[in-house]
Amino acid sequence: MLYIGSHVGFNKNSQLLGSVLEASSYGANTFMFYTGAPQNTMRYPIDDKLTNEAIKKMKEVGINFSKVVVHAPYIINLCNEANFDFSVSFLKGEVERVSKLGVKYMVLHPGSHVGLGIDKGIENIISGLNLVLDGKTDVTILLETMAGKGSEVGSTMDEIKRIIDGVKDKSHIGVCLDTCHLNDAGYSMEDFDKYLDEFDKIIGIDKIGCIHINDSKNILSSHKDRHENIGFGTLGFDNLIKIIYNERLGEIPRILETPYVDREYPPYKYEIEMIRNKKFDENLINKIKQS
């Protein structure tokens, strides 16, 4: 079965239940969310009643709870020594919140070394992850493949592999592929099976726990990380459909992080419909604006 969804909101009053209702309105059968604002530390207690209502609602609307994913906030940077203790502590707290919600997977940006260099950055990431994945959590952290913008770590298979190799609890570490990031990092998405062959050889396909489906505004190897709506970027609709329906990815969740149209209109309902129909609609943007 294809599990396709998008990023959705998570607010104080409705929490996970609100996330489920939003995902359902898009015709999704999975989704991804932040447990609070990704740019700050403001967090509120998890409401178990709302969580239980959300789990019940997921069963009613056909969303598979086991495929739901949380994204860690951007302010966590395990590479940065100046904020290392904060990042470890905050990530631990996020893992605890995710576990309390009953979600099993959390996507994490590896971080930016901000001048320390790749080797030291990777060393710091490994140290941080080993403090967080202490053998007591049931949450798996998925390292996201990055575009290589600035001093980002994790834009190559080798960097991701080095991090995974250094993590002691390998049963709770994995990878989240991002199609836009892969393109911008220099991996062509025109022959995705070739990419998977290399990934399987170096890391192992079994380590892939999620894939972010995004078109890109940028050419190959641009190292810019600017997402585009499905079919309107340099990757193209046909390539993305081949990736989405690639049987080697099994039933891992496919998550859209494409931009709002005019920063106002969510595209996900229409993109999911287009993906399920496997037919590109060149009038999609206008349809979204008029909806």
Image (cartoon, grey):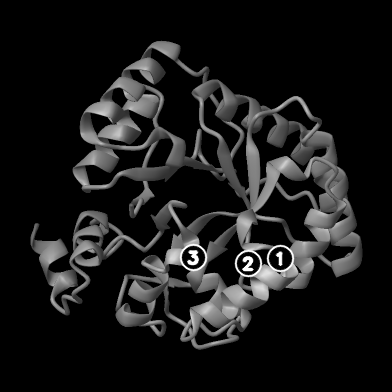
The amino acid type of the residue labelled 3 equals Arg
Instruction: Look at label 2 and name its amino acid.
Output: Met
Residue at 76% of width from left, 32% of height from top? 89
Do the CB atoms of the residues marked 2 and 1 lie less than 8 Å apart?
Answer: yes
Q: Is residue 41 above or below residue 74?
A: above
Give the side of residue 9 with respect to residue 85, left or right: left
Structural crowding at the residue carrying mark 3, measured as other residues with C-alpha within 10 Å and reported as few (<14), some (14–19) or many (≥20): few
Classify mark 2: helix, strand or loop: loop
In this view of the protein, which residue sits in the foreground, 71 or 138? 138
Q: Earlier in the sequence, mark 3 or mark 1?
A: 1
Closer to the eye: label 3 or 2: 3
Q: Position of residue 76 (x, y in %)?
A: 69, 45
Label 2 sits on residue: 146
Report the residue that reaches farthest toward the left: 290
Label 3 residue SS: helix
The answer, for residue 149, to whether it is visible in the render is no
- Residue named by callout 3: 248
Q: Nearer the viewer, residue 269 or 261?
A: 269
Query: Can you give x and y, in whole percent of width and height, for residue 291 in the image?
Result: 9, 57
**Residue 82 percent location from the top left of the image:** 86, 48
Vertically, is 252 above or below 226?
above
> Disc 2 versus disc 1: distance between alpha carbons?
5 Å
Please give left or right for residue 265 compared with residue 164 in the image: left
Q: Position of residue 244 (x, y in %)?
A: 38, 66
Q: Earlier in the sequence, mark 2 or mark 1?
A: 2
Gap between marks 3 and 2 measured at Cα:
22 Å
Q: CA distance from mark 3 to mark 1?
A: 22 Å
Tell which circle, 3 or 2, labels the residue nearer the N-terminal end.
Answer: 2
Q: Is residue 105 above or below residue 263?
A: above
Q: Is residue 230 above or below residue 255?
A: below
Q: Residue at x 11, y 66 (%)?
A: 287
